[in-house]
Image (spheres, rainbow, N blue to C red):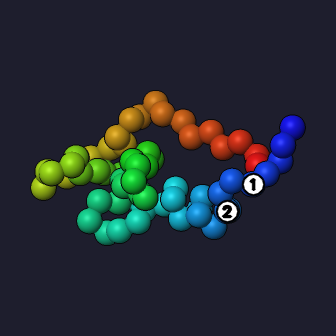
Amino acid sequence: MDETQIISEAFLNEATNTSQNINEAYGYLWWLNGKSSYHLPQSQLEFNGTLIPNALMICMPL
């Protein structure tokens, strides 16, 4: 098995956390799950709860 690292640990940590204060459920170009509220694209409305309640994040060791 090739064990070439394709992304850095620092990028993975940054990419899976909130990237700005406007919408805490959004990271770097994808939605984050597990936040207490979210905004949909082009909406000023804030919705309570997680975006996808049953979603799990699975990280594979590099």
Q: Could you tell me how far apart the alpha carbons at marks 2 and 1 are, in whole angstroms?
A: 7 Å
Where 36 sits versus 53, above or below? below
Q: Position of residue 7 (x, y in %)?
A: 65, 57
| Tag shown at residue 51 | none
Image position, residue 48 (x, y; %): 27, 47
What percent of the width, then of the height, locates residue 1? Answer: 87, 38
Q: What residue is at 22 percent from the left and 46 percent from the top?
A: 40
In the picture, measured across the screen, residue 7 lies left or right of residue 16, that is right
The answer to whether residue 41 is above or below residue 28 is above
SS label for mark 1: loop
Q: Nearer the viewer, residue 35 or 39?
A: 39
Viewed as shown, does residue 42 lie left or right of 2? left
Name the amino acid type tagged 1. Answer: Gln
In depth, the one of 9 and 33 nearer the eye is 9
Which residue is the site of mark 1? 5
Secondary structure state at the residue bearing disc 2: loop
Q: How many residues crowd mark 1 within 10 Å: few (<14), some (14–19), many (20+)? A: few
Q: Is residue 17 above or below residue 41?
A: below
Which one is nearer the viewer's eye here, 49 or 52? 52
The residue carrying pointer 2 sits among few (fewer than 14), some (14 to 19) or many (20 or more) residues within 10 Å by Cα, namely few
Q: Which residue is mark 2?
A: 8
Residue drawn at point x = 67 percent, y = 62 percent: 8
Residue at 41% over, 49% down: 30
Three-letter code for the amino acid on which mark 2 is drawn: Ser
41 on left or right of 61: left
- Tell me if label 2 and label 1 are in contact, CB under 8 Å: yes
Farthest right residue in view? 1
What residue sits 36% from the left and 42% below the top?
50
